[in-house]
Image (spheres, rainbow, N blue to C red):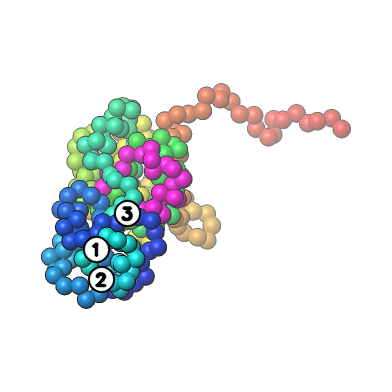
Amino acid sequence: MSLGHAAVEDEDEGHLFGRHAVAEALAGNRSVLRLLVADGAGGLTQLIQDAGEQGVPVQHVPRIHLDRLAGTVKHQGVAAMVAAYDYVSLEELLETARGRTKTPLLLLLDGVQDPGNLGSILRTAEAAGVDGILLPKHRSTGLTASVARSSAGAIEHLPIARVGNLATTAARLQDDGFWLVGTDSEGDTDFREVDYSVPLLLAVGGEGSGLGRALAKRCDWTVRIPMHGKVNSLNASVAAALLIYEIDRQRRPSTKQSTRSAKSRKKTKA
């Protein structure tokens, strides 16, 4: 997968320089977001192939760009842009979630590619007490510095795992007692009509594409958000927020016993 000479993000993600360091990052557990290859650099065929097999975008850049990024470090014509924050394993995420509650809520984000949207979702999820986030390794933005800034610090307090295949992972978790709810504009159930009092996986699709077909087929319920205006869809962060807080409302209902309606208010004497 190559991005040609597209503009490089001027972000403060971490970078690893040199062929050995990059090879180790691709072979290990480090989250590699992008491979940067200097124009004219040779001997990088295997690294480029390894990156492609893992779905890591490869971007060719002028050598002077790597010179500026690396400073005094020898880059050998290649650098890896790595995630600003590391992920936890799926097992660690599940252990943390089950340690918090008997009815964990995990959020599966399928193909959310806009860093601002992902950061906003993380912010909402942390505020509402979501127990963990699952992201796919491919076709999704990673935990970049842009995402961290958009999350307003929430990224520091949420366990986030990255898995190879969301549908396969969801199937495993369903076998382990979770129920899967997915958002779909054509969903068969109003999102307010589902009982969310069970261990839950909430799957939200990315901008435009929605849930992938394999993940959608695995859903126990597909829910829709009613639309009464002329716009027929909401972006991923808004849809996620509505679902998350409906789940929170059901699980932690208000302790207020009654609400006085406007019609029952006593009229103030003139």
- Label 1 vs 2, first from the N-terminus: 2
Query: Which residue bears the numbered disc 1?
Result: 75
Q: Is residue 165 magenta?
A: no
Visible in this render: residue 101? yes
Q: Tell me the SS state at disc 1.
A: loop
* Residue mark closest to the camera, 1 vs 2: 1
Q: Earlier in the sequence, mark 2 or mark 3?
A: 3
The span from disc 2 to disc 3 (Cα, nearest Å) is: 18 Å
Residue sitting farthest toward the right = 270
Q: Nearer the viewer, residue 14 or 115?
A: 14
Whether residues under marks 1 and 2 lie with C-beta atoms below 8 angstroms apart, the answer is yes
Q: Secondary structure at mark 3?
A: strand
- Horizontal side, residue 43 vs residue 270: left or right: left
Give whichever of discs 1 and 3 has the lower sequence position: 3
Magenta residues, as a range? 143-162
Q: Amino acid at mark 3?
A: Gly
Residue at image mark 2: 38
